Image (cartoon, coloured by chain):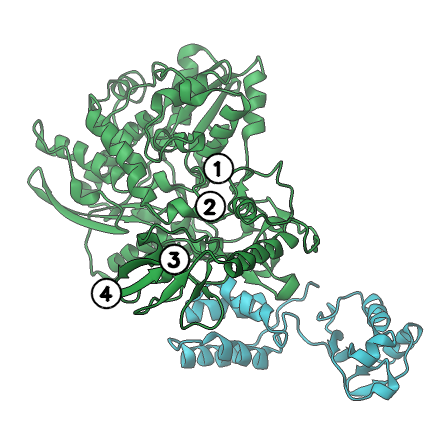
């Protein structure tokens, strides 16, 4: 996992704590609190999970177990530019795994992670309904189709900070 | 009562019983894997599947409740086929390095595979080797052997530690600590209950056996062993003797056959601990020190307090554990007396405990112990030396550290330290004729309390075993609900006789007897038969004070026999 410093604000912490207070003592409180925590911070770093564990009086291992079980929870923040590579069936048979590999190599991080400068994050998705354009990659909502691994570098450079 | 038939045998059990419990009454074996009495009951491994009338498909006997008129079949072709497939599926992701595995011949999976004629490669071997976490001084985790039964997770949660759990999903799922941290970097207290809960070789202690063999063959080293109180009550299990057999004499003989070594008795420094601890308690009472005083001989408990309750550290006795007292005595007094350089004396402590392996790494303790090996490691050395343990003639511990009182012996069971301290406190305050037995603090209940009148003053005591119970006591003391004078805490349920370094006992045995009680009885029997019952009667301890320490809590004893604690992070 890439090293990213936690940058939480006092307002975010206050919001998290009030959410914990609201659910404390309920059976199954962990799921709604994790959802809200991810809404507040965009991801679930160590600093957030320990507050949740402490607040709900459950072990950190339990919090982490749930956070890593569900793919909708993220342990990495999202970058300023969100890159998403489709790994749906059509894209996959057209070689989108190679595209994803190229993106990972270009940015120096793995799928699901964020660059240390928080400029880019990579995710994979399953079918965006543009199978005719397979393989497909989306950057900040913009769809790039019929891609080859070679084209990745050029596309990403459009989004790099000068 | 509910009436049912299992394999045609009528059995009558209380309502709410499970099929597994009913089967036990009918003397019918049902194999289990993820189920462990007092630890976990989740019905996830599917080994205990049986046929039951009224149920769709096979049901898990460990969780399925009985009902009136139910007919259960535990041994049909359908059941056997299902269990066999379950074993084979587990084996498909298991690192099958059985010959060199720590659990070889003692593995619950191996036993099941054999019983069900499982083919180890029916579904191939579909896994990547996972990294081994061996950074902890106490516990090694090899997840390539893990069968995902989560017994270790349940054992850790029962200790209210919870530093391990399942993480990720599907093929990526592993058991481990959050954020991919090594166990060494968590608030694990090293109690090792995860190890004794593990059915396979995925968890084991960080072994010091090779180092000890190295020291034994090194002509420059004087090697001395000493054995903790509970080892005599459990070592025999590793050689097929019945649970609860006292093998003290054979154990000493076996250690002496390992090489040119001496074997001393740690029960003696248990007595020394009592001399220091009882006097510390009296001093706290008289001089208005922090009360209640908590015992300090359990390193798992001490680390627990450092992580989770740093505010009570001033309440913990400053006495080192018997292990560390002994090593300090050996590297100072004994070395001086016998003109041995401390660096040439190699001190091996045989302990029932994995937390003691951590304890010897503590800087403030002074690094007097060279190696701490568990009961299991000692058994391994004895087997490696090909010693015929069962037929060994009994031998005595070596002088001058062989003598022990019954009080020292019972240190190995929950309540033992408390009773030992009470015996000496009663003598100090009440003189001759003081009571010898304090039975209220005995037994395997998780939390025991009693009130005694000793020398005219009332003493309220509590004994907690298992860290969940320790937590309860601390919370009650903090809230002011209880005003104990003295509290004994042992991290492991049942105390050292059920420590994380004790011989592996299969679930089948653990589920059918009270392991803790049977092992503890061996110690209480030895106490009863012992010539002396109280720590202050131990003449070897007396000599130590006369020749070296002067008196309890002297300057010298503060220097060598006492220590201090420090706060540690919770996460």
Q: Nearer the viewer, mark 4 or mark 2?
A: 4
Disc 3 and disc 4: Cα gap in Å?
19 Å
What mark, if any, has residue B243 been given in the picture?
A: none
Report if the CB atoms under discs 3 and 4 are less than 8 Å apart. no
Label 4 chain ID: B
User: Which color is chain B depicted in?
Assistant: green
Instruction: Specify whether A39 is left or right of B57.
Output: right
Mark 4 surroundings within 10 Å by alpha-carbon count, few (fewer than 14), some (14 through 19), many (20 or more) = few
Reply above or below: B327 against B473.
above
What mark, if any, has residue B190 been given in the picture?
A: 2
Reading the image, the residue beneath label 1 is B357
Report if the CB atoms under discs 4 and 2 are less than 8 Å apart. no
Q: Position of residue B530 (x, y in %)?
A: 22, 24
Label 3 chain ID: B
Reading the image, the residue beneath label 3 is B7
If you read the primary sequence from the N terminus, does the residue marked by circle 1 or circle 2 appear first? 2
Helix, strand or loop at label 2? It is loop
């Amino acid at each position: 996992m890439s090293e990213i410093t936690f940058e939480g604000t006092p307002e975010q912490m206050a919001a998290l704590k009030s959410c914990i207070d609201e659910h404390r003592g309920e059976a199954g409180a962990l799921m709604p609190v994790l959802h809200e925590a991810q809404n507040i911070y965009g991801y679930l770093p160590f600093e957030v999970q320990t507050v949740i564990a402490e607040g709900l009086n459950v072990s950190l291992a339990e919090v982490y177990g749930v956070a890593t079980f569900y793919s909708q929870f993220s342990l990495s923040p999202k970058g300023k530019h969100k890159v998403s590579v489709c790994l749906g069936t059509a894209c996959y048979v057209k070689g989108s795994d190679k595209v994803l590999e190229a993106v990972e190599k270009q940015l120096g991080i793995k799928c699901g992670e964020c660059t240390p400068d928080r400029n880019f994050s990579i995710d994979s998705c399953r079918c965006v309904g543009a199978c005719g354009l397979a393989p497909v990659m989306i950057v900040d909502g913009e769809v790039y189709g019929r891609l080859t691994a070679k084209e990745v570098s050029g596309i990403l450079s459009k989004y790099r900070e000068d | 009562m509910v009436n049912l038939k299992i394999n045609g045998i009528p059995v009558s059990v209380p309502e709410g019983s499970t099929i597994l419990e009913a089967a036990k009454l009918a003397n019918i074996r049902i194999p289990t894997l993820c189920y462990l009495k007092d630890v976990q009951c989740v019905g996830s491994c599917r080994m205990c599947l049986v046929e039951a009338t009224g149920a769709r498909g096979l049901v898990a006997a460990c969780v399925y409740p009985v009902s009136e008129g139910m007919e259960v079949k535990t041994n049909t072709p359908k059941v056997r086929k299902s269990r066999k497939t379950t074993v084979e599926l587990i084996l498909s992701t298991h690192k099958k390095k059985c010959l060199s595995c720590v659990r070889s011949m003692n593995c619950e999976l191996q036993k099941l595979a054999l019983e069900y004629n499982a083919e180890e490669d029916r579904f191939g071997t579909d896994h990547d080797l996972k990294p081994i976490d061996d950074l902890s001084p106490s516990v090694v985790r090899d997840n390539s052997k893990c069968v995902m039964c989560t017994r270790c997770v349940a054992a850790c949660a029962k200790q209210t530690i919870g530093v391990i759990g399942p993480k990720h999903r599907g093929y990526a799922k592993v058991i481990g600590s959050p954020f991919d941290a090594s166990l060494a970097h968590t608030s694990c207290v090293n109690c090792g209950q995860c190890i004794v809960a593990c059915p396979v070789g995925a968890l084991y202690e960080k072994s010091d056996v090779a180092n000890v063999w190295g020291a034994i063959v090194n002509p420059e080293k004087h090697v001395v062993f000493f054995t903790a109180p509970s080892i005599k009550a459990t070592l025999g299990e590793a050689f097929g003797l019945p649970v609860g057999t006292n093998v003290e004499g054979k154990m000493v003989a076996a250690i002496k056959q390992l090489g040119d070594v001496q074997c001393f008795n740690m029960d003696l420094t248990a007595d020394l601990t009592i001399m220091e601890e009882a006097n510390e308690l009296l001093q706290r009472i008289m001089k208005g020190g922090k009360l209640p005083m908590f015992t300090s001989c359990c390193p798992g408990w001490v680390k627990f307090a450092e992580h989770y309750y740093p505010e009570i550290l001033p309440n913990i006795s400053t006495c080192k554990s018997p292990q560390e007292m002994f090593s300090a005595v050996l590297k100072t007094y004994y070395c001086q007396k016998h003109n041995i350089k401390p660096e040439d004396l190699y001190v091996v402590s045989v302990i029932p405990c994995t937390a003691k392996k951590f304890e010897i790494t503590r800087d403030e303790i002074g690094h007097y112990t060279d190696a701490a090996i568990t009961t299991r490691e000692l058994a391994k050395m004895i087997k490696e030396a090909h010693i015929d343990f069962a037929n060994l003639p009994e031998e005595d511990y070596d002088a001058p550290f062989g003598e022990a009182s019954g009080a020292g012996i019972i240190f190995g069971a929950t309540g033992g330290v408390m009773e030992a301290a009470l015996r000496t406190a009663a003598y100090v305050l009440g003189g001759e004729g003081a009571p010898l037995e304090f039975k209220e603090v005995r037994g395997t209940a998780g939390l025991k309390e009693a009130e005694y009148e000793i020398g005219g003053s009332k003493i309220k005591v509590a004994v907690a075993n298992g860290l969940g119970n320790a937590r309860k006591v601390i919370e009650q003391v903090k809230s002011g609900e209880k005003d104990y004078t003295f509290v004994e805490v042992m991290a492991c349920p049942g105390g050292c006789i059920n420590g994380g370094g004790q011989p592996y006992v299969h679930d089948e045995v653990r589920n059918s007897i009270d392991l803790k009680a049977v092992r503890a009885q061996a110690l209480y029997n030895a106490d009863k038969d012992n010539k002396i019952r109280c720590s202050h009667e131990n003449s070897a301890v007396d000599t130590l004070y006369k020749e070296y320490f002067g008196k309890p809590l002297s300057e010298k004893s503060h220097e060598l026999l006492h220590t201090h604690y420090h706060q540690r992070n919770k996460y």
